[in-house]
Image: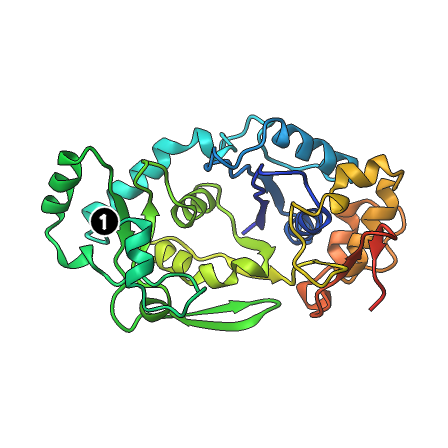
Amino acid sequence: MISRGRFAPTPSGALHVGSARTALASALAAWRDGGRWVLRVEDLDVTRAVPGAVEAMLDDLRWLGLSWDEGPDADTPHAPYRQGERADLYREALDVLRAAGRVYPCACSRREVEEASRAPHGAEPVYPGTCARRDPEAVLAEARAKGRGVAWRFRVAPHTTVTVRDAIAGTFTQRVDDEVGDFVVFRADGVAAYQLAVVVDDVAMEITEVVRGDDLLASTPRQVLLYESFGARVPAWVHLPLVMGDDGQRLAKRHGAMGIRTLRERGVSPDTLRGELLATLGISDAGDRPLRDLATRWSPAAVPRLAPRWSVSANRFEAR
């Protein structure tokens, strides 16, 4: 089977060095055995979308020397590559889960879930199963009477434990019913939740390996449950240590000084930045060789386990 990897950014801000590093790693992983690299825009949450962010991200990736095999500007069998244009697929997937009895309607508000959660303060709320014990038709009728929508939650069986074997993070085991509970796959506003959309898209686009930041590792068991519910093959997992700022905090889009566009304006060359990023992925002598050639030398095992730090003042990664 030909490898198929993907980079799936959210257009909620400028592309920063952490996201660019993930893009490079996912491309190397897809190309190392002659596979294909897919670029997909995860723009479901319109409230977070920044006008012009998609076009700016694509331009920054091209500036870095990255060219995708499939993406929003390519007419291929897996189009469209923007989640905002794939709503029908998510609705069909929800219908499959409903027919199989794997989901149920939930009328609980966010506040009600947080107040009833068993999770420690500050942790992700664990749904207590309030609506799981109610008649689904009664929940739907009540919501209609109030003019409200319902969320749809995936029913997690008692004692459900999922083990994820990751090429970098190692073995990660989660007791999903106890640590997460029944989770939302479709929001009350009629929009697919991230967990469902990402699985539906990866299955439809035949993704065989997922390379992304390790902040998403904890959500992976939920996605495994969805893959299994659809009878789909679970991809291989590669979760990268996140890039940190020189303040020791997680790099985020609010760090404007780490934005690719800002670095371009400061005169940083694409070759220099690409070399810096590749070095944090275990390729220290890249030179000016094409990325597709370098991919044959790359392996997740080469990635340092220590999270890299980006120095704002020096416009480069700190020596570790």
The location of residue 276, given as percent across then percent down, is 83, 54
Side of 123 where 305 appears, left or right: right
Q: Residue sitting at 38 percent across and 53 percent down?
A: 232
Visible residue check, residue 65:
no
| The quadrant where residue 246 appears | bottom right
Side of 13 where 44 appears, left or right: left
Q: Is residue 282 above or below residue 8?
A: below
The location of residue 209, given as percent across then percent down, is 55, 54
Q: Residue sitting at 71 percent across and 69 percent down?
A: 306
| The quadrant where residue 84 appears | top left
**Residue bearing mark 1:** 106
Side of 231 where 164 appears, left or right: right
Q: Amino acid at mark 1?
A: Cys
Q: Nearer the viewer, residue 31 or 190?
A: 190
Mark 1 residue crowding within 10 angstroms, few (<14) / some (14–19) / many (20+) = many
Q: Nearer the viewer, residue 46 or 156?
A: 46
What colouring method underlies this structural image? rainbow
Q: Is residue 49 above or below residue 227?
A: above
For label 1, the SS is strand
